Image (spheres, grey):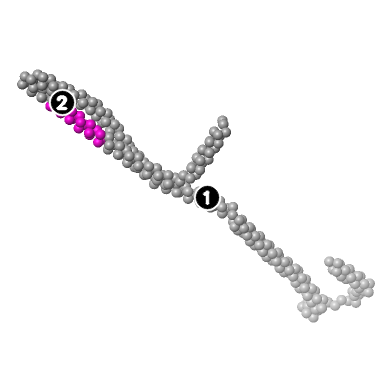
Amino acid sequence: MGLFDRINRVIKSNINEMVSKAEDPEKMLEQSVLEMQEDLINLRQAVASAIAGQKRTEQQYNQAQSQANTWQQRAQLALTKGDEGLAREALQRKKTFVETATTLKSQLDSQTTQVDSLKRNLIGLESKISEAKTKKDMLKARAQYAKTQEQIGQTIGRIGNSSAMGAFDRMEEKVLQMEARSQAVAELGGDDLENKFAALEPASDIDDELAMMKAQISGSSTNPNPLPPASSSSGSSPAQDAVVDDDLDKLRKELDSL
């Protein structure tokens, strides 16, 4: 393939692509219907012209037939009067009109066939135009719907890829994180409060028990069933007191080490 052929092909392909992109279905449908209507007008004019020609030919044929009949009658009249030469001349004129009528009849038959064909084409074109007008409105509505759907899809795509939508998503995630931190802080604060109250409860029990022990130790007067006094033989000795003191010291050390 030569260089110029390749360039020519590239130019044609680019032109075709530009034309294809420039074609608006709605405008093209309107233009197509207008062109078909123009064709219909031209076809009607052609049919009218063919019919007019057919009528002229038919009139000429009828006139030739009438003239042939007239000269036939004249030839008979001349022959009746004994004028054979005049009869011969009349028959000669009749022959001329007969030949003309024969030619016109052939032409008339051809024109009749042509007119019938044009009439059928006219009826077919009128039917197609009527159908095209009906389809035109439907196709325009479908084209408009498809165009609207395409615009909606493009808009949704732009929204999904826009920086504003990305910023919105980030802010939504940030708010969720803030809510999660707030909830965690609240839960931790609640645990500390519960722990503090839990720590107070054992101390309260110990204080109650300690108060009871003090009352038992100091309260012979408050004891409804006082114990009998201890005999001298059962009194504690200094050695026993020293053991008790040692035990108390050990207890204090163990408590301090806790």
Q: Quadrant of the N terminus?
A: top right
Q: Is residue 133 magenta?
A: no
Image quarter (top left, top right, bottom left or bottom right) of the C terminus: bottom right
Whether residue 196 is visible to the viewer of this picture, yes or no, is: yes
Q: Give the image location of residue 4, x and y in percent.
A: 55, 34
* Front label number (2 vs 1): 2
Query: Where are the magenta residues, as a range?
Result: 51-70
* Residue furthest out toward the bottom: 221
| C-alpha distance separating marks 2 and 1 | 82 Å
Tell me the residue that label 2 is attached to: 68
Residue type (three-letter) at the residue carrying disc 2? Ala
Q: Amino acid at mark 1?
A: Gly
Tell me what residue is drawn at x 74 percent, y 70 percent: 200
Residue 61 on the magenta segment: yes
The main secondary structure of the magenta stretch is helix
Mark drawn on residue 153? 1
Residue 245 appears left or right of 85: right
Identify the residue at horizontal 53%, vertical 50% (top origin): 154
Quarter where residue 93 is shown:
top left
Between discs 2 and 1, the one toward the N terminus: 2
